[in-house]
Amino acid sequence: MGLVTLDNINPAIRSMEHVVRGPLFLRAVALEKELKQGSAGKQFSEIIWASVGDSHAMGQQPITFLRQILGLVTYPPLFEDPSIPEDAKERARTLLSSCMGNSTGSYTDSVGIEIIRHHLAQYITERDGGIPSDPDNVMLTDGASAGIKSLLVLLRCNFEDKRTGVMIPIPQYPLFRASITELEMAQISYHLDEEKNWAVDVEELKRALENAKKTCVPRVLVIINPGNPTGQVLTRENIKEIIKFAHDKKLIVFADEVYQENTYGSNEFHSFKKVMTEMGPPYNSLELCSFMTCSKGYLGECGFRGGSFEVVNLDPGVKAMLMKSLTVQTCPNIFGQIITDIMAAPPKLGDPSYDLFIKEKQERLQSLQERADIVTEALNSMKGLACTPVQGAMYAFPQLRLPPKALDAAKAAGQEPDYFYALQLLEKTGICMVPGSIFGQKPGTYHLRTTILPQLELLKVMLKKLRQFHEQFMDEYK
Amino acid sequence: MGLVTLDNINPAIRSMEHVVRGPLFLRAVALEKELKQGSAGKQFSEIIWASVGDSHAMGQQPITFLRQILGLVTYPPLFEDPSIPEDAKERARTLLSSCMGNSTGSYTDSVGIEIIRHHLAQYITERDGGIPSDPDNVMLTDGASAGIKSLLVLLRCNFEDKRTGVMIPIPQYPLFRASITELEMAQISYHLDEEKNWAVDVEELKRALENAKKTCVPRVLVIINPGNPTGQVLTRENIKEIIKFAHDKKLIVFADEVYQENTYGSNEFHSFKKVMTEMGPPYNSLELCSFMTCSKGYLGECGFRGGSFEVVNLDPGVKAMLMKSLTVQTCPNIFGQIITDIMAAPPKLGDPSYDLFIKEKQERLQSLQERADIVTEALNSMKGLACTPVQGAMYAFPQLRLPPKALDAAKAAGQEPDYFYALQLLEKTGICMVPGSIFGQKPGTYHLRTTILPQLELLKVMLKKLRQFHEQFMDEYK
């Protein structure tokens, strides 16, 4: 037997739960391989990936301007290509001149290239109607996840043997639970109110907080807006209530706002920073970290792992400690940074690339809007499924109302009922969705998370297959 | 006063020491800005960056084949460019077909793209003269640092209140000390033997281990070979001794082998895996993690943060836990992965790109070799500096023999003597080197780390400036 065994590894890693890429996902990966080799013995020929918020994987095409710049900064002979517009070349030159040795192959500042931080601060300022953002408060990371983790690490502090408590929504994106487990912090769960379209209920926040105080020191309140996996967009009124609560209870707010560009219909995104600033004293002194990415929005460039965050009202000495801790990993990858730059400072009216850029951006956002509506409608038309409208992000999170026989069958199989459903869905149709139990849900309720990301034709096929499967399933266990 | 203060953040972050990008580096960054603005009031006009192992920053040009592929996979219209050879296009097609949706903008497997893991395993197999490497044991990460940290996290386990001890060389690359501090593990320092060209002395390992056993449970032995900051290449005999020691003392070996392509003259790199396998039972059952990167070698593509590691003899259940923990951050960035692919599977004899590739590779390695020799020789020709030969990696680590007056002046300034020297060097010449105290050194000895990376002409200028400064300094404090 070796030295390192399951008994003597980090217990936090051992008890960490599988995230979206858990056993069901791995089964889908294996099944896809079998399908390609012709050995699956299934009546379908492909996996429909509705499990991961990955636009490109599901056929979204990249934005031309962005990819021109990525091409230019890695492969300089492209500067000679007359088909690439001058503004793309100009931007690529500016970016290269910000890299040491004029090469994207060199390290950058640990918190990201200065000019990109400036662009990002300007972007945030414009987003918030002129409320200023200081580039010194804006830092780049390898995906939003790395920033979330760095800030959790920073705030991890025991108080007379009580651990730091982090309030997270249920359902939540599992990165939070996994990171809290790994860091041996204390998870404080508060339930979102499905009946109010997954709003945050302040009474529920209070309940969760008071309850947690016995065993930990609550310090951080995590809000995911627009919601993952729940697809809601919080109202301004709701955000105001949350800010008041956080202020009264002396909590630092982590606003996971990575889907801020993904809102549909009349649902407007309100940043926590804007709302707290407009509320004035004492609320504008709230300590806030807001997270952003270029994996979502209309760009959807997940593979490059671009992310960033802004800290607001953070003590300068603490910020210096944060920056020190970020230097250990040298720097975030350069392409994630460059994509962040294009997100923050896209072509302007009058630039040669502007028309095509706007056209491509709007097409992608309109298509997402259309798919959001189709998914909401289709899910609600199936008996035994009930779905709040997809207002934002890239997900629908319908409730599964399973008949008692299905619950019994799941129990007999030793599976969570929604896992039982999702696994059968995968095995019978090739559709890969994520069971609600991965994100957490109110006891006795069962959900399913699907993305709205398959391109339109495939989405229609998927919904049709889902309907057939669902009807058979409900019939089988009625 | 805000909620988050220096008193209530993570104490491990507070006590973490500054790494290479510490105060001296930041002063150099500020000085460079002043120089550009013309407000520095200095007699020199540029900073010479000899502080960071960043080839591209110092003018090394990228490898054509690599950049063609990076261009192709981000900007597909390049497939129409007749000036790009067919083998580059073929490789780019293969890589794209391994990405979901045929786009580098999609997430990959959490441990990296399968075909790249296969190429990497093949590369390791060939490196080790046919000793097989299993692709399942090879994983990709955002730079080698991320892998080192993930494996430290995995092995972090308290044993009846005793922490996990990690043996690290002194001097060492500060990532190790910083990570151990952040993770609240126990650092066990063993000194390299400068008089034996920074070899690992087994008696010293024993001393450090026995001494540490009182306060922690030693589990991991870190070896950096070729050495950073010390530039040595361990002999096969020395590696054998280390393996015996690790086996006898039941230690897991972390072999930081990121500079394995950077050896000069007759100094041959021997991988820990090869040596332990050739030693046969019981030594071939050693549990080993070996780390690799594409930031070094002849590629030097630091900005893209490509890294990987191979685990050897790791328990399958433990490996599954490791893989689970890696899924939390979704996946390593795609460009780091693709560059790793090119490193692992470069053009082969007969391929259209082969001749140019080999020419470029050899030019870069020969130039490094030449610069290694020049630096060693120049440093040893200065009175008060003594430098072991640069056998590998990208660094020289000369000992500074400072006169008592200089030590007094440093003390009066409240600075470490080598920091005192390096700061004056920066302020008087614009040369940025790293004081040995950042890496750790035997008490009473003082060092300086310089890279060998400035291109030849600049390197000569730098060494001339250093000589002038050094003579003045020694004269001033004699």
Image (tube, coloured by chain):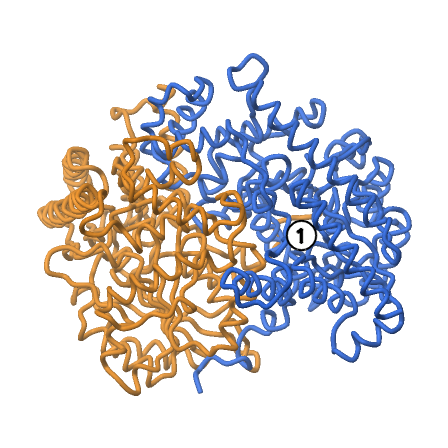
Chain colours: A orange, B blue
Left or right relative to B453: residue B404: right
Look at the image and tell me whether residue A215 can be seen. no
Q: Does dot 1 land on a helix, a strand or a loop?
A: loop
Name the image quarter holding residue A444.
bottom left
Label count reads: 1
* Residue situated in front as seen by the camera: A287 or A449: A287
**What residue occupies the far top of the structure in this picture?**
B350
Residue visible at 17% across and 41% down in the picture: A470
Residue visible at 34% across and 45% down in the picture: A90
Left or right relative to A299: residue A137: right
Percent across and percent down for residue B374 are 78, 41
Residue visible at 51% across and 29% down in the picture: B64
Above/below status of A299 relative to A120: above
Which chain contains the residue that carries disc 1? B
Name which residue type carries label 1. Answer: Ala
User: According to the image, label 1 marks what residue?
Assistant: B50
Q: Quadrant of the N terminus of chain A?
A: top right
Percent across and percent down for residue B368 are 70, 37
Q: Quadrant of the C terminus of chain A?
A: top left
* Residue situated in front as seen by the camera: A169 or B372: B372
* Residue situated in front as seen by the camera: A80 or B311: A80
* Residue situated in front as seen by the camera: B112 or A382: B112
Percent across and percent down for residue B460 are 72, 45
Look at the image and tell me whether residue A253 can be seen. yes
Pointer 1 local density, CA inside 10 Å: few below 14, some 14–19, many at least 20: many
Left or right relative to A351: residue B229: right
Percent across and percent down for residue B144 are 59, 46
